[in-house]
């Protein structure tokens, strides 16, 4: 790839804003020089432009903010078709919408189409890295990794382990699920920017034997990640208590089998007590807080103040399809709302830190991404403060970087993402420009979907649409 350069307002973090007021670093008119997928220089435009050399193309994003690409630490690529599906709570939602949708991922063509769509959406939203759950089917993770590999996306993913309390089509047979996890890890872990996560779906859908085997695999392969759900809803916590009466707590179920360590990423972590929080922090595990999902499913409000106070590593996840959006900006805004519900306050700089350098640090990627430092991989999001009339009006009134980031987070979504660079490659405009050029299979599926959908609806007298 030829050397390129990006001009704009550079914003990143040298540390955690909770620990230092000087953690945010801004160069108002900056230049990032990118070579072979890496940032090779960063400085003020005036000091760097003249040493660029001939023939280096400078893309001018003056007026926009250039930040490290956003990192979503918990989401599900097979749940795109169940986003915005209401239910009375987590367990009802899983049973009624999610499990039936996941059954379709036995078909590799379904997996491949969803993987393409999902990665397009990540790019559209400025997300350059994610921790992703597949379905129980190994082919779902093969498809996601293959597509991510072709695009150069940094990704952690794993197949769900589940051998009870789920539909028979989604049930691992005997010990095969753990064996398949190991095979997937051998195929993909460490290949380019990909990493494997041992992924017991949640304690309620694994037998004690499966969890124990997963823990043994985690012990034998400390280079692999672990990801799962933890203490999401009160009903779920009660159920886990019945299933594992010997455990002190939900967290204890995972800890007892060796699934709680520095490379463990647990989504939600709402219903933990003080002992659990201390234990979680001591293990250096990562909490992937998913506020949009928690509000949508009525699961509860994460207590950011207590978690930070206990020393837990906090990051943010969209948790689609429980979550209502793949936008990390919208997720940050909802985190802010949830913190308020608990009587706390989150600043925009804190939230952007959690979605960039904080997540990179939590995942052990600090030397690679989450920063605009020279030497880092060139994962960059370009945010446009003028993207919508209201955002432009509010941005014009911003008198600090905190205020501008706050406005972007509250009023922005994928519309505010002008461009997303993945390892130096523009990944939003290229995909969106090519959007109408669907593959024959994709467009056939889209036509089929629309036929089936329209068949279920009647036109209302006013020209609108009503349910039959
Ligand atoms: N717990 C077990 N599976 C799931 C899932 O798919 N989504 C969420 N939000 N929670 C879960
Ligand atoms: Zn989830």
Image (tube, grey):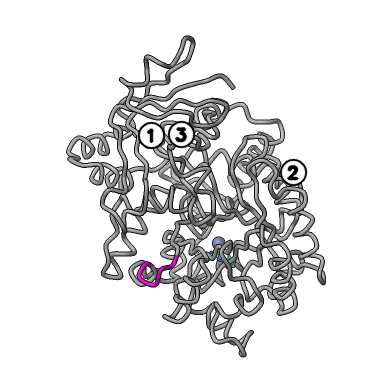
- Rate crowding at label 1 as few (under 14), some (14 to 19) or many (20 or more) other CA atoms within 10 Å: many
The span shown in magenta is 308-312
- Rate crowding at label 2 as few (under 14), some (14 to 19) or many (20 or more) other CA atoms within 10 Å: some
Find residue 415 and report its image quarter.
Answer: top left
Secondary structure mainly formed by the magenta segment: helix
**Dot 3 corresponds to which residue?**
374
Position of 272 compared to 341: left or right? right
The secondary structure type at the circle numbered 3 is loop
How far apart are the alpha carbons under marks 3 and 1?
14 Å
The secondary structure type at the circle numbered 2 is helix
Which is more N-terminal, label 1 or label 3? 1
Give the x, y percent position of residue 460: 46, 47
- Which dot marks residue 66? 1
Q: Quadrant of the C terminus?
A: bottom right
Say above or below: 37 vs 302. Answer: above
**Residue sitting at 58 percent across and 61 percent down?**
263
Say above or below: 419 vs 161. Answer: above
Say above or below: 146 vs 85. Answer: above
Say above or below: 390 vs 227. Answer: above
Viewer-side label of 1, 2: 1
Which is more N-terminal, label 2 or label 1? 1
Give the x, y percent position of residue 188: 72, 48
- Rate crowding at label 3 as few (under 14), some (14 to 19) or many (20 or more) other CA atoms within 10 Å: some
């Amino acid at each position: 790839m030829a050397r390129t350069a990006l001009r704009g307002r550079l914003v990143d973090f040298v540390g955690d804003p909770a620990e230092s007021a000087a953690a945010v670093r801004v160069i108002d008119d900056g230049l990032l020089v990118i070579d072979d997928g890496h940032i090779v220089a960063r400085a003020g435009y005036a000091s760097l432009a003249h040493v660029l050399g001939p023939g280096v193309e400078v893309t001018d994003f003056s007026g926009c903010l250039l930040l490290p690409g956003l990192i979503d630490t918990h989401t599900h690529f097979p749940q795109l078709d169940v986003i915005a599906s209401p239910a009375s709570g987590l367990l009802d939602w899983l049973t009624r919408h999610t499990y039936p949708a996941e059954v379709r991922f036995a078909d590799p063509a379904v997996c491949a189409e969803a993987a393409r769509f999902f990665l397009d959406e990540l790019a559209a939203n400025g997300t350059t890295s994610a921790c992703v759950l597949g379905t129980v089917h190994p082919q779902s993770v093969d498809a996601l990794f293959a597509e991510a590999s072709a695009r150069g996306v940094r990704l952690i993913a794993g197949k769900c382990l589940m051998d009870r309390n789920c539909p028979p089509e989604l049930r691992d047979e005997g010990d095969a699920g753990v064996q398949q996890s190991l095979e997937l890890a051998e195929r993909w872990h460490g290949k380019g920017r990909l990493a494997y996560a041992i992924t017991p779906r949640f304690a309620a859908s694994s037998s004690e034997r499966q969890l124990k085997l997963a823990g043994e695999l985690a012990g034998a392969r400390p280079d692999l990640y672990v990801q799962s759900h933890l203490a999401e809803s009160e009903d779920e916590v009660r159920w886990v208590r019945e299933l594992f009466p010997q455990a002190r707590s939900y967290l204890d179920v995972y800890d007892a089998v060796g699934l709680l360590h520095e490379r463990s990423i647990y989504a939600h972590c709402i219903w933990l007590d003080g002992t659990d929080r201390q234990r979680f922090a001591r293990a250096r595990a990562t909490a992937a807080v998913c506020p949009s999902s928690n509000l949508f499913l009525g699961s509860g409000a994460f207590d950011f103040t207590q978690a930070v106070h206990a020393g837990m590593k906090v990051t943010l996840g969209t948790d689609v399809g429980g979550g209502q959006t793949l936008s990390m900006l919208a997720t940050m805004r909802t985190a802010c709302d949830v913190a308020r519900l608990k009587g706390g306050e989150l600043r925009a700089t804190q939230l952007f830190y959690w979605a960039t350098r904080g997540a990179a640090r939590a995942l052990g990627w600090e030397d690679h991404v989450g920063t605009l430092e020279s030497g880092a991989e060139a994962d960059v999001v370009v945010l446009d403060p003028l993207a919508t009339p209201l955002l432009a009006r509010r941005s014009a009134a911003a008198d600090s970087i905190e205020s501008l980031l706050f406005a972007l987070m509250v009023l922005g979504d994928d519309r505010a993402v002008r461009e997303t660079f993945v390892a130096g490659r523009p990944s939003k405009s290229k995909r969106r420009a090519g959007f109408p050029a669907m593959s024959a299979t994709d467009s056939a599926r889209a036509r089929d979907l629309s036929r089936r959908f329209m068949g279920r609806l009647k036109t209302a007298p006013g020209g609108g649409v009503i349910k039959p």
